[in-house]
Amino acid sequence: MDVSHAGRSPHDEYPLEGPSLHLNPRERQDVWKQVGDAIESFTADLPRLRISPSGTPDQVRALLAGIDFRRPMAPADAVAFVVGGLRDHQVHCGHPSYFGLFNPAAATMGVAADALVAAFNPQLAAWSHAPFPCEVEELMTRELAARIGYGPGAGGSFTAGGAESNHMAVLMALRHAFPTFREHGVRSLPGQPTLYVSPEGHHSVVKAARFCGLGDASVRTVTTDEHGRARPAALAQQVESDRQRGDLPFLVVATAGTTSAGFIDPIRGLADVATRTHLWLHTDAAWAGAAALVPDLKPHFDGLERSDSLSIDAHKWLSVPMAAGVFLTRHRDLMESAFGVDATYMPVSSRERIVEPHRVSIQWTRRFIGLKLFLTLLVAGWEGYESMIRNMVRLGSTLRARLEARDWRVVNATPLPVVCFQNAHQGSGSPAEDARAIVERVQARGQAWVSLVELGGRILAIRACISNFRNDEHSIDVLMDELETARSQADLPPLRA
Ligand SMILES: *Cc1c(COP(=O)(O)O)cnc(C)c1O
């Protein structure tokens, strides 16, 4: 239903039926049916929807301005109102020609899982409140850990995403390096704890450092090679000189698949330095970690199993709805000492071999995050996931080749399906200005979606990423046409200020 709601109150059309949190069985069935139908028609219509939202901020606010919570709505009207808003006013990341950030197309079984989780609403803070969900998550973390090459001492926890997983890593590393940290915090330390990450590493690492009381300046950038990968020798030197100054290096974060350009740090080389210099090695594989689960792509992540901890987002390349991240570690036994606190009101399981989830997580009340991955995997199998990921890697190569054949210059080198490129044709402005104008036009036309990226702090390029399982050959045709159209208009003044 593509209704425009602007300018009228939703209550005008939706008379009051009798307000309550309770709905009767008949009303509930109607809601489930309506929601199911709305999800199906959205999914079926996706290829024909505009990818980018229409409407100015004022139009979107006007839509909501008519809401009056003193006048409850009928369920069907409320659902229809929300469905209309969602269809018209968001970027549709699941669209086949969305080549944007790592936002997934949500797999059907993952969507079903989230609906079931909302309805059954298990509480995963305590094992005894949710034995089946807790054991499903346990099975999933074991399964992922085994695919990574971790041994039996591995453990993990589902998180809201890569930012939370990276935060866990910083906390684990602090707890491990500094015995007084847990009781007395950073101020008990005789110097400034420092951590190391490449300049292309994710900014959530900076946030994590700040949240741990270390400050942004505790994050030191490691020099990279000509392909944007952290140089282990540079790390070793930097750790050495920081130690001489009295700083307390404790952690290096390897990025396996940088967000901008898909660079993969040399994990084995960083692991060697980390071992020698007593740093915790965390690998942030938030999006590309999915490829490390595919046996023939795993060699690109050489040394991954030596990481002390690791982030993989299920809500990126594993195509389940947000929010679903995974934190894994080789040192399961250290998790409780980093995250556990005793709370007498919490139910405790007297059984052996039970870990209370709230003791190994930043979260307390926790949603059953792992079900989306479990249910999707039950139906797709690893085989289904592997062929999807291999296919996207192949499409990445196709896109690269087609761009180069049409006078675009690819500026990043990676085996992963993220392609950063510039106009190599005579443009009106610099390649960076062209990139900006072209991205703006492609997004405004709404038929495909690419983003603008800065590499090495300078080069502005167009970025197209294939991590949406609906991307196919046809979507690449669409993208190539859209890029061509935008390029032909790139000498026009900018569309938006
Ligand atoms: C996306 C991303 C993150 C952040 O993950 P969220 O799930 O958005 O919290 C961290 N690291 C990398 C490399 C990423 O691509």
Image (tube, rainbow, N blue to C red):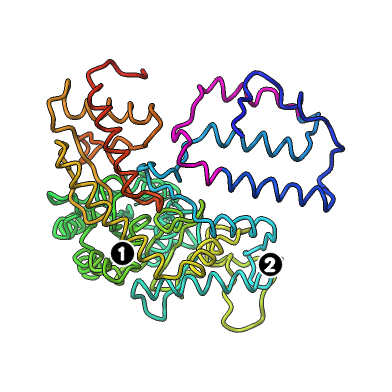
Residue 465 makes an appearance in the image: yes
Q: What is the x, y in percent for residue 286?
A: 38, 56
Local packing at callout 2 (Cα closer than 10 Å; few below 14, some 14-19, many 20+) is: few
Q: Amino acid at mark 2?
A: Met
- Label 1 belongs to which residue? 281
Q: CA distance from mark 2 to mark 1?
A: 33 Å
Q: What is the x, y in percent for residue 200?
A: 26, 47
**Element under disc 2:** loop
- Label 2 belongs to which residue? 346
Residue 13 occupies quadrant:
top right
Q: Which residue is depicted at the point 78% across and 34% down?
A: 73
Q: What is the x, y in percent for residue 405?
A: 14, 41
Q: Is residue 377 above or below residue 198?
A: below
Quadrant holding the N terminus: top right
Name the residue nearer the viewer: 13 or 459: 13
Please indicate whether residue 4 sits to the left or right of residue 26 in the image: left
Extent of the magenta region: 42-68
Residue 468 belongs to the span the image colors magenta: no
Q: Which residue is depicted at the point 77% across and 30% down?
A: 14
Q: What is the x, y in percent for residue 272?
A: 20, 69
Q: Amino acid at mark 1?
A: Leu
Residue 63 belongs to the span the image colors magenta: yes
